[in-house]
Image: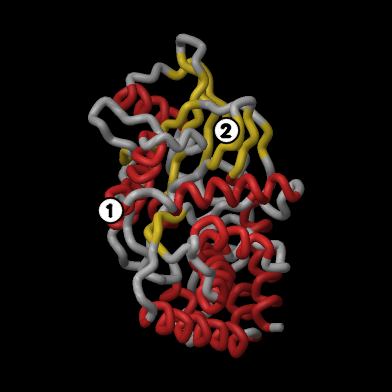
Amino acid sequence: MLTPPDGFTEDALVSALAAHWQLDAASMNYSAVGFGSHHWDVTDAAGVRWFVTVDELQKKLQWLREPLDAALDRLRHALAAAVELRALGCEFVVAPVVSRSDELVVLAADEFAVAVYPFVGGTSFAWGEFADKAHRQAVLDLVIAVHQAPPAERELACADSYAIPKRDELEAVLDGAHGPAAGGGPYCGPMRRLVGQSAAGIRAAIDRYDALTRQARAMPPRSVLTHGEPHPGNTMLTDDGWRLIDWDTTLVAPPERDLWGLDPGDGSVLASYAAATGVEPVAALLELYRVRWDLTDVALEVGRFLGPHKGTDEDQKAWQLLVELVGQIAA
């Protein structure tokens, strides 16, 4: 995220850190990284560095009228699974630090979720392609370790519901339910026109996704603990080896949820996974998660532009992403 969240001040963050973690922030710098949570690099009075995340719960809702507590509950379950996974010996997991009241994430300013992590030094990577074959293999090894977590560990995380977040808002725009006055920013009108012009392609993608979901539900259970987004941007190379970060998307789901983006297209990663685990990836489920990834990004950006926005650099980046994704789906 390029800018701090509206409605949440650094004073509120300082107060939350002091009240819940007894962390006396001597300095803090906003880190314009990632595209989901907001991040701060915080140094306490003792000179110890921390990495702090703040999530806007409104943007974590599955549908427009879902209560904020549901989004907070999913986040708590996801982070609890990460903490337990690390406790089981998976040192590559960068897990949050518990608060004074044994919470992994706390609510601040009514609608913001705050979590604290140890600061990890090392080489970071951007979203996109893996640095090399060794990088891809290293992430596959981490994913396999996550998938092999025992059943008790899987009970901590929520199960994948196959929902597309903000689908109701996307379908409302497709149906023309939002009139010209809807929305509170400069991209609302262009967004509605873009979606309207590509409505047939978007609806076809949704129909395909629904068909794949029905197929997935009819399969025998084969779910594992999944990270959800094991792309290069969520990896770090430290002096002690590879690390996997951003566990807020952890769910119990078919293994394909982590595999669809790992394979370079030649089947090599899928074959390696099958050889290591005895589980053959299913083509229909790989497609399911590939389609859902694109539809989710489209729906999230539609939801963004239906709400108040100011045309910031972050909004411009989101608009460019939406144009690109809609073009891909329409094609």
Q: Quadrant of the C terminus?
A: bottom right
Q: In this view, does 330 lie to the left or right of 50?
A: right
Going by the numbered disc 2, the residue's amino acid type is Tyr
Task: Please report the residue visible at 55 percent of the width from the left and 71 percent of the height from the top.
Answer: 286
Task: Please report the residue visible at 46 percent of the width from the left and 11 percent of the height from the top.
Answer: 45
Q: What element carries label 1?
A: loop
Q: Please, which residue is most extreme toward the top here?
A: 46
Q: Which mark is residue 155?
A: 1
Return the residue nearer the eye: 44 or 319: 44
Q: Please, which residue is most extreme toward the left here?
A: 101
Residue 260 location, x and y as percent? 58, 65
| Of pointers 1 and 2, the one earlier in the residue sequence | 2
Residue 48 location, x and y as percent? 49, 15
Can you tell which of label 1 and label 2 is closer to the viewer?
Answer: 1
Badge 2 crowding class, 10 Å Cα cut-off, few under 14, some 14 to 19, many 20 or more, is some
Position of 47 relative to 92 (above/below) = above
